[in-house]
Amino acid sequence: MKNFFQIGIIILLSFSAVYSQTDLDQTEAMQFYDDEQYAIARNMFLEITQKDDIDDNLIATSKFYAAKCLVQLNLIDGAIEELEFFVRKYKFSSYRPEAIYMLGTIYFAKEQYFQAREKFILLLDEYPNNEFSSISYYWIGQSFVNENKFVEGEEFLLEAISNDRNSEKVDYTIYSLAYIYELKGDYNSAVTYYDELLAYHRDSELAPSAQLRIGACYFNLKQYDRAILELTDPLINKLPEDQQVEAGYLLANAHFRLQEYDEAEKAFKDVLSRTTSTNVERQSKFGIAWVNFQQQNYETAYDQFSSLINRDQPDSITIKSTFWSAECKRYLGDIKAAQKIYDEFLKNYPNDEMADAVKLSLSIIQFNNRETKISERNLLIASQAKDKIIRGRALTLLGEISLEGKKYSDAEGYFAKAVKIPFLPKKISNRAILGLGISQYYLKKYDDALMNLNDLNVRDQRFESRKVNFYLAETYFDKGNYAAAQRHYYRIEDKGDELDKLALYGSAYSYFNMKDFANSAYYFREYLVKYPKDKNAKDVRLRLADSYFGMKNFKLATAEYRKIFNSYGVNYRNAYTLYQFGQSLFKSDESDEAIQRMQQLQTEYPKSKYRDDAQYLIGWINFQRGDFETALTDYKNLLTMYPKSPIRPIAYYSIGDSYYNMGKYDSAIVFYLKIINEYPESRFVYDAINGIQYSYLAKDNPEKAVALINAYIVKYPHASNSQKILMKKGEIYYSYGNYQKAIEGYNEMLNFYPKSDLAPTAMYWVGKSYEMLEDTVNAIEYFSTVVDKYLRSEYGIEAVIELGTIYSAQKDFEKEIQLYKSVLPKISNSDKAQEIMFLKGIAELNSGDQEAAYNTFTEIIKYYDKTLFSAKAKIELGKMELDAGRFPNAEILFSEVAQNRTDDIGAQAQYYWGYVLFEEGKYEEAISALVRVRTVYASYDEWFIKSLLKLGDCYVQIKDKKNAREMYRAVAKRHPDDEYGKEAKSKLAEL
């Protein structure tokens, strides 16, 4: 406070107005004032104010100087009273701005910052261009800074700088603004303003401090090289001793962070060599001891700290050294010695600010000794410490104790308080955030846990990364986001500890829950290899078997289930395992044992939820064997044994299927009808209608199936299956070849359910029915409606293809091309787009536009490489190159397809490859290519026959008539009456 008061007085004096009065009394009073005889001067000024017939300006001047005398006499309260009166009374006095300014500086010096700001703001409002304006912004900003209101302080200090960069105290303004940024942690901005002060105000008394603060900022930015550069600047030597010690500490620590330990010690020794102050000497020795402590040279550090302890005349160094000597003993593992020093500390310095740190260290010892209650009691005291670091550490340790005791709500509270402490060292705040996230995980506050753990993961990926990733994984797992869980399990570095085991277990289960059974099997298997005797091994083996089952590797699944039954005994068996085992046996063709296991399940677990499923599986196995009679008995047993089973409809359906396969269609219909009658609104009704449909079709009586559909729709028009079932009418007639009736059936569905999702399907089949009736006008109308209104539906693109086929048949290639062009932009992300592009290319080829077709096929190859239509496009391009005589290009295209496909497309490409080689006169190579059609693609008759004919031609060219005749005869024998046979016979005749 004193410093700011003196600053205010200095500024005040510098702005005092030069008197211009000629009155002798006032002249004499001013003389006494200038001679610093303020008591005499004040009495004379007051006498002047008591005289009669005195000019108002003279009275105002005397009143003002009388108040100034009180300021100089340090009678502040009286000065405030008189200056406040002056400001109210003499609103037009030329001294009023100075009086307001004086009041502001006095209130500032008294730390009454609100009143100070009121005066400075009044000055700025009423005298915005006054000589005190710029400096007022500084005082307002600094008052906010002193109240830790940095945002407001920053605003006014910036205004002060922009208002007048040449004002008397602009260096103080710049320094204060830089210091705000430093306190806010915006070290780069702080450096910018400290640098400005050094650049433009090098002679300022604040320049050495600015140099020090730049070093400190770079230190906090972890730019230790630059910190060392700044802290070794000659300006540092101009700092007061206490600040030189601070610079020495920073310099030593900067060297230490760069692992330059010798330089760190040298920095302190350099301070020692440059000072005669005992205090500085002790500070520097303390710094050297601290460097050794940081280097874990605890024995040396203990000796150095001990040498600084002066119990007769304890100072701050003695007190700190006592504490750190105890810390050395604690880190050396000499707990008794450490406790003795801690106890001595608390006895001698109970009210010292480091007493809380001592209690914290004692609490840590007590915690490690499992003296939890005593530890908690001391930590609660330490958690109220003024030192935020001690407070943060105490709260964090309290949280960890609560976490260990599974008091998750208490733990969350302690960690949350620690996290809210601003500017904690990273190590402490990270621990608190981690603890908070873990607590919230156990409290099932998953979103909060994820927010905190992800925040920690982003801000410091190296801090406890294994534990952070583990709890992130566990939280995502419990939220059901198994993909995210697996990613974090995967990031846990393998160190062969318990966490590895838990991560492996969680990772396997994540894949399992994602139904990625190949990966889950891999990790479950790895778990069993690493931890065969672990408590989770039995569960892991079961899930390994389930994973193999999910992969449909039933042989391996059966082997694992068998291990469970053979190795783990009766206590580990259950209905689920038996059921899975039985299914695996069935799927791996061990049906007899599968039936035994299903029977065993029903005997050993008669109340299990799998019992009816087990009985059904027995029936299904016999059904799959073709033993429909036995299957019937099994299914009917299910109905008898489990009358309330939820799978009764499936049993009815399976009985119907059994009768159907036995050719007993009437009996099949009876059981299909049971589903409709007993479960009319279940999802099985549609399957039952299907069964009835096929039964009546087998009896050549589709009308009865249609009648059943009509009856169902009348009775249950709004059932979930009704729309699909009504569609069956059209399907029945279409499959029977009665296309007119099919049209009526599909239209009935459209009329009855006009907003149905099945509308585009019905329209498509109406179009197909008209197409089958060769009514292309109506077919085009329906297909066009599907294309225009329902392009993204299941049958949208199918309708495009059918419409294109009609246009192609009509040889209206332009209309076909325009159709494809209009839909392609709308289906660019569809897998069907390549097919439409290919059809467009064929249409362009048919229309005679070779260039457009060439470009289209090229585009397909570019954007859809290694797909079916890319291969087909290559063949079409190859044929175009062949026709144009560009044989090398054609050869490349055909060979690419032939080498990568083994289907009919590959056969076609292989044939054309041989054909090109023949046209080039490369007969031996052509023979090799064509023989490959015969050996690899013999099942594709068209290309097989064509290759034989072309092989015969090759042999003719190389004068091998024997092999030529053999090729032609093979064709004539295989196709005696068609065009291929005729061509072969003709060529034989020529030979």
Image (cartoon, helix red, strand yellow):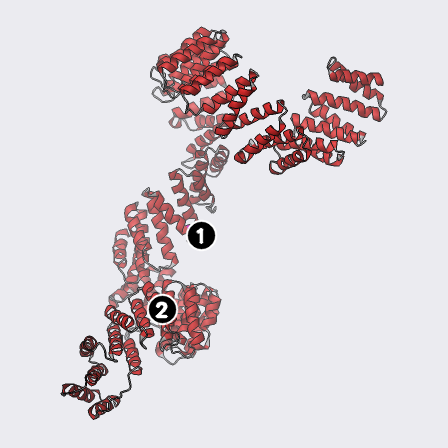
Give, as a single range, the part of the protein colored magenta: 457-464
Residue 423: horizontal and vertical position, in percent?
A: 35, 60
Residue 21: horizontal and vertical position, in percent?
A: 24, 89
User: In the picture, which quadrant includes the C terminus?
Assistant: top right
For the question of whether residue 617 can be seen, the reply is no
As drawn, 748 above or below 700: below
Q: Which residue is mark 1?
A: 461
Residue 636: horizontal and vertical position, in percent?
A: 40, 11
- Residue located at (38% from left, 66% from top): 182
Question: Foreground residue, 754 or 529?
Answer: 754
Residue 828: horizontal and vertical position, in percent?
A: 54, 36
Mark 1 crowdedness (10 Å alpha carbons): few <14, some 14-19, many ≥20: some
Q: Amino acid at mark 1?
A: Gln
Q: Amino acid at mark 2?
A: Glu
Question: Foreground residue, 112 or 512?
Answer: 112
Q: Which residue is mark 2?
A: 159
Q: Is residue 459 magenta?
A: yes
As drawn, 505 above or below 374: above
User: In the picture, which quadrant includes the N terminus?
Assistant: bottom left
Q: Secondary structure at mark 2?
A: helix
Q: Secondary structure at mark 1?
A: loop
